[in-house]
Amino acid sequence: MLAVQHVRIEYGSRVLFADLSFVIQGKERVALVGPNGAGKSTLMKILVGRVTPDGGKIVKAKAVRVGYLAQEGIETSGLTLMQEAESAFGDILGVEKRLEELGAELEVLDPKSDDYAETLDRMGDLQLQLEEHDVSRIRPRIETILRGLGFKQGDFDRMTDEFSGGWQMRIALAKLLLQEPEVLMLDEPTNHLDIEAQRWLEGYLKSYRGAILLISHDRAFLDALCKRTLAFGNGRVEEYSGNYSFYEKESVLRREQLEKAAANQQREIEKTEDFINRFRAKATKAKQVQSRIKMLEKIERIELDQDGPEVRFKFPDAPPSGQAVVKLEDVSKHYGEKRIINNWDFTVEKGDRIAVVGVNGAGKSTFSRIVAEKEPLTGGKMTFGHNVMLNHFAQDQAEELDPKLTALETLESVDTRGSKIDARSILGCFLFRGDDVFKSVSVLSGGERGRLALAKMLLTPSNFLILDEPTNHLDMASQARLQSALLDYQGTFAIVSHNRDFLDPIVNKVLEFRVGAPPRLFLGNVSDYIAKREAEEKEAARVEALHASASAGAAAASGGGASGVNRKEQRRIEAEKRKLRASKLKPLEDQLEKVEARISELETTKAEMVEKMNDLSTFESKEEAQLFLQSFKDVDAELEGAYSQWSDISEEIEKVTAELEA
């Protein structure tokens, strides 16, 4: 479907990758992993034509569409949410045209070739796509995807201009999913999704029919979806036939093997050099010496990446707090008519390690701002315990940085209360390498400013941390360092995050915020919380089914004649209704039955023809192939007509039934 051939990209003297080649097949799930700045997002931009490579090329099949979700810079305006989502279907008519183009290509391809088989497969997918894009199904599909991504019914008629950056990303993601491109490229799609939306997206992508290229710093998300990994780093890209966890283990084994090979090679080189030095002056050995010199020149030296020393980040020491870190009593928080928290009691105890979760807009960030005293209470009281030293990281924390300082000066200005720090090493933990530390805050990207603000905040001594989405701009290695530091942290913390893999090892409680309901506390980590939620949902569905069954039974048991009408008159009225119903509905029902039978025949015929398409012997003759394809088109057209007829008759039956029951 898509091939990358010998692609090279460089910025000045820095080479991101020199000779990158790989192929994406239909329905593959490929993870692009590696440190920030290694070239993952750049590759995606090359694949969609936003960046021109310095060498090589991208080869794409004519009928393959590539969809791309960027990390940032997404903005829509001028339409309602529903209108914007409906615009995703602007190219449905183009599906028919692509089918015709593929049919024309099929006529000139060798029936025994791989291209022929792949073209047939694409035609089958497009045919299914055309069938699914029945106009009557478009609105339900839009609503399903918008709700899955966290939008509410009341959002559908809102202008897209009203939505914040994170919700703008969800709008763009919804449109991509509705368009169903053959290759779907997602750059950090979960950054702005809460756990509920992330769970929905993970399930949706598991059954997605096209290929997926995925950049994410969420290990659990990658592991659940991807079966192939491309690892970027040090100017190279290595391929692994497994998910992220497989890549982690396999990369260690490859490194060990490479180190052994390099050591063996170095021993052989040293032996050869020793021979040359010993016998260089002897005429009898001149030929052998020259032979070994040429051999040394031809050796392709094994180069090992020189990893710097592993840098571990440690929080500054702080005195212990009292047992009750912060106590909320009868607390309320309202924004006008919107009630976020109502008459809530909650206590954060010493040693609590709390994950704060819930759908966006339920109150997670509001809670963190209240506890950090950045938001006033509408009602109630908040009391801090003895000797509490609070530190708060908000998503907009970067705005408070001094734009005139460099990254290094920003950290060096932090009052660490006598604790010694290696500012450059800590900046390295947060992805500032080499001369990056001398960059002025004013020229840093949004992600860089966010990482710098996080590093600065974590250097300030505290025994109570409130962190709002701290991992959004961190790569896997930086997340691991922060995670390790939090494991060793002696204080109390509450973290607003959806990153399950990051949270699971470090939290012991989960605080769930819900729209229109009080927050709930769960013991355990996020995986424990999700398991409990799933059990609750299953039980709720079971109880609902029992109630529906009981209601139906009660309705049947209470049936009878209308009050004030005797039994004989009631029977006469019912007989007249049956007669009228038979005279009006019976002909329509007979028509519907015939159409349904014809649809069944045509669907069976079409399924048999699709099965034959998978057998290349069916198309050994071009004449037979053309006849077969024409027959397939005729059957398909008749089936479409039958569907339309069935829909018209069904609507007429519903209309007549409503009139009779009025």
Image: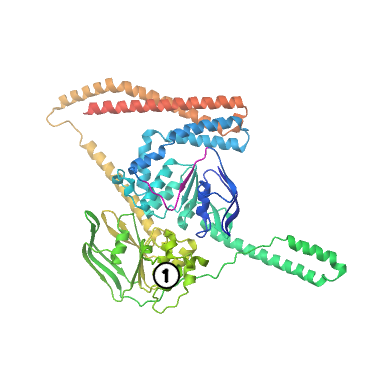
From this viewpoint, which residue is outermost toward the right? 284
Q: Residue furthest front?
A: 404
Q: Quadrant of the C terminus?
A: top left
Depth check, front residue: 331 or 426: 426
Residue 264 shows in the view? yes
* Residue that badge 1 annotates: 410
Picture quadrant where residue 80 is located:
top left
Q: Is 145 contained in the magenta span?
A: no
Q: Which residues are magenta?
A: 63-76
**How dense is the environment of label 1, judged by Cα within 10 Å: few (below 14), some, or many (20 and up)?**
many
Q: How many marks?
A: 1
Q: Position of residue 271 (x, y in %)?
A: 75, 69
- Please state the horizontal and vertical placement of residue 116, each as a whole percent of the image: 59, 35
Does dot 1 land on a helix, a strand or a loop? Answer: helix
Task: Give the quadrant of residue 568.
Answer: top left
* 63 lies above or below 517: above
Q: Is residue 353 visible?
A: no
